Image (cartoon, helix red, strand yellow):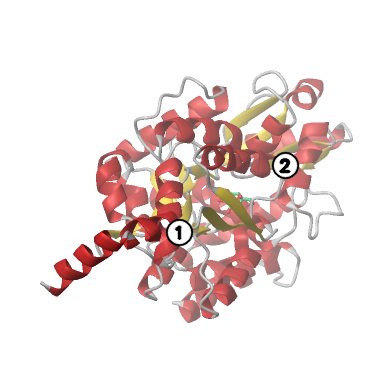
């Protein structure tokens, strides 16, 4: 009765309309999309929101993989200063949801039919306690090689199908005086590459047990030791200046033909796209040798915070735009990723994108779709950080042997759990 009365009064005095008119027409977004390809992709979203009358308040925090961005987000949230949304990876969404600071997009999700169009693997991280708390933007995959085609042709190379083939190919590049492997020596890049090495060395079941189930026996196995041996082998093909290099600068080395190949998630393709390069002509995308048939994925999510009422309409507009079919196609073509919905046609995607879409579907149906440990989808952030730390210490020689690396990995993951 009281509620009715209040509504009646508000309507009568025109307050309800005034409140609506006062909606803040602005989206404040924290993200780490600062490379050329990433910024171009973000522009697609800014443009779509501008058409609906929403201004964009950018909160960029540079640093691939998002570690710096997540530190900045933590400080903002602790100060009660919630952005409309933040780019987030997997388990981080669940952490913030458990802390009770996320909003509830369930009504929008129902209206838009997200339950049916977003794959279950993503809903596991965007729905918490029955409520939609994040809008998935894309699906990236990390087990890729990005190869400069002119360099490959020059050295007479072909697609490597096994780890040994890969080593033989890197040897050819070295003999021709080209930097074989472009790597950025930052912990998240090294661990992202190691995800692929582990899948290639141990196979799909092993990857899942070790890096998704955190099975102790697998983590301390000879197969894990062999994986570190293989990683050590790859690192011998990196140039001496790799420490601290940003991922997109490593991609640029391949684009320019200074290096043969980069092992990186398909955000690297966003850089090729931004440089007007064409797959099949200028560059090649192959699955990391020995991982065909499996996909190690991550997905960028826009985590939606529990913002004040006058900012909720903008949040709904952002979420709706993010998961619209047309945006999912236009954005992911530029970003290098594939749609976060299963019903988006692959028509506008290049050959690598079409392959990415088909691979994802097959892996999802065949039970070979695995979360990336390096990219926030294998285990909660504390475990992922412990993992990145051990891999990086190994790459940079602070951990000297594969035996030691295995011992340190088991210990670090155990402590972080
Ligand atoms: C990943 C993210 C990608 C890309 C990459 C490099 O964590 O999922 O969208 O931004 O970092 O910055």
Q: Quadrant of the N terminus?
A: bottom left
The structure residue drawn at horizontal position 62% and vertical position 40%, both measured from the top left corner, is 43
Left or right of residue 188, residue 398 in this image = right
Label 2: how many residues lie within 10 Å, few (<14), some (14-19) or many (20+)? some
The structure residue drawn at horizontal position 40% and vertical position 32%, both measured from the top left corner, is 325
Marks 2/1 in contact by CB < 8 Å: the verdict is no
Question: Residue 36: which disc?
Answer: 2
- Image spot of residue 42 (x, y percent): 60, 43
- Image spot of residue 119 (x, y percent): 33, 43
The structure residue drawn at horizontal position 51% and vertical position 53%, both measured from the top left corner, is 25
Judging by the rendered image, the residue that carries numbered circle 1 is: 22
Q: Quadrant of the C terminus?
A: bottom left
- Image spot of residue 304 (x, y percent): 43, 60
| Residue 414 visible from this viewpoint | yes
Q: Secondary structure at mark 2?
A: helix
Question: Residue 337: which disc?
Answer: none
Quadrant of the rendered structure where residue 334 is?
top right
191 and 398: which is toward the camera: 191
Quadrant of the rendered structure where residue 321 is?
top left
Measured in 3D between alpha carbons, the distance from the residue under mark 2 to the one under mark 1, in whole angstroms, is 35 Å
Q: Point out the tag, 2 or 1, that comes first from the N-terminus.
A: 1
372 and 216: which is toward the camera: 372
Of tags 2 and 1, the one toward the viewer is 1
């Amino acid at each position: 009765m009281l509620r009715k009365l209040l509504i009646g009064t508000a309507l009568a005095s025109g307050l309800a309309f005034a409140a609506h008119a006062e909606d803040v027409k602005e989206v404040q977004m924290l993200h780490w999309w600062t490379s050329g390809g990433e910024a171009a992709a973000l522009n697609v979203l800014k443009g779509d929101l501008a058409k609906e009358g929403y201004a964009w308040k950018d909160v960029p925090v540079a640093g691939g993989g998002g570690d710096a961005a997540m530190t900045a987000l933590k400080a903002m949230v602790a100060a009660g200063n919630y952005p409309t949304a933040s780019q987030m990876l997997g388990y981080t969404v669940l952490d913030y949801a458990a802390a009770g600071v996320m909003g509830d997009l369930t009504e929008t999700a129902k209206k838009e039919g997200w339950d049916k169009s977003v794959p279950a693997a993503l809903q596991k991280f965007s729905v918490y306690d029955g409520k939609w708390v994040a809008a998935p933007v894309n699906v990236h995959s990390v087990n890729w090689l990005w190869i400069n085609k002119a360099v490959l042709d020059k050295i007479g190379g072909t697609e490597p199908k096994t780890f040994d083939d890969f080593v033989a190919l890197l040897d050819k590049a070295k003999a021709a005086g080209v930097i074989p492997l472009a790597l950025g020596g930052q912990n998240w890049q090294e661990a992202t590459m190691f995800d692929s090495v582990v899948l290639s060395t141990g196979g799909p079941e092993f990857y899942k047990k070790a890096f998704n189930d955190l099975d102790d026996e697998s983590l301390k196995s000879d197969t894990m030791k062999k994986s570190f041996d293989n990683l050590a082998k790859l690192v011998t093909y990196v140039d001496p200046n790799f420490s601290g290099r940003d991922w997109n600068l490593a991609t640029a080395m391949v684009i320019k033909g200074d290096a043969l190949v980069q092992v990186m998630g398909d955000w690297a393709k966003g850089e090729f796209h931004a440089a007007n390069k064409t797959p099949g002509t200028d560059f090649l995308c192959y699955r990391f040798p020995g991982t065909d048939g499996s996909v190690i994925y991550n997905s960028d999510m826009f985590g939606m915070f529990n913002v004040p009422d006058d900012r909720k309409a903008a949040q709904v507009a952002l979420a709706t735009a993010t998961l619209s079919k047309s945006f999912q196609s236009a954005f992911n073509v530029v970003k290098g990723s594939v749609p976060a919905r299963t019903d988006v046609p692959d028509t506008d995607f290049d050959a690598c994108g079409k392959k990415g879409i088909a691979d994802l579907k097959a892996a999802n149906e065949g039970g070979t779709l695995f979360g990336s440990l390096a990219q926030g989808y294998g285990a909660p952030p504390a475990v992922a950080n412990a993992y990145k730390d051990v891999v990086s210490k190994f790459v940079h020689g602070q951990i000297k042997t594969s035996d030691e690396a295995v011992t340190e990995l088991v210990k670090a993951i155990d402590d972080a759990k």
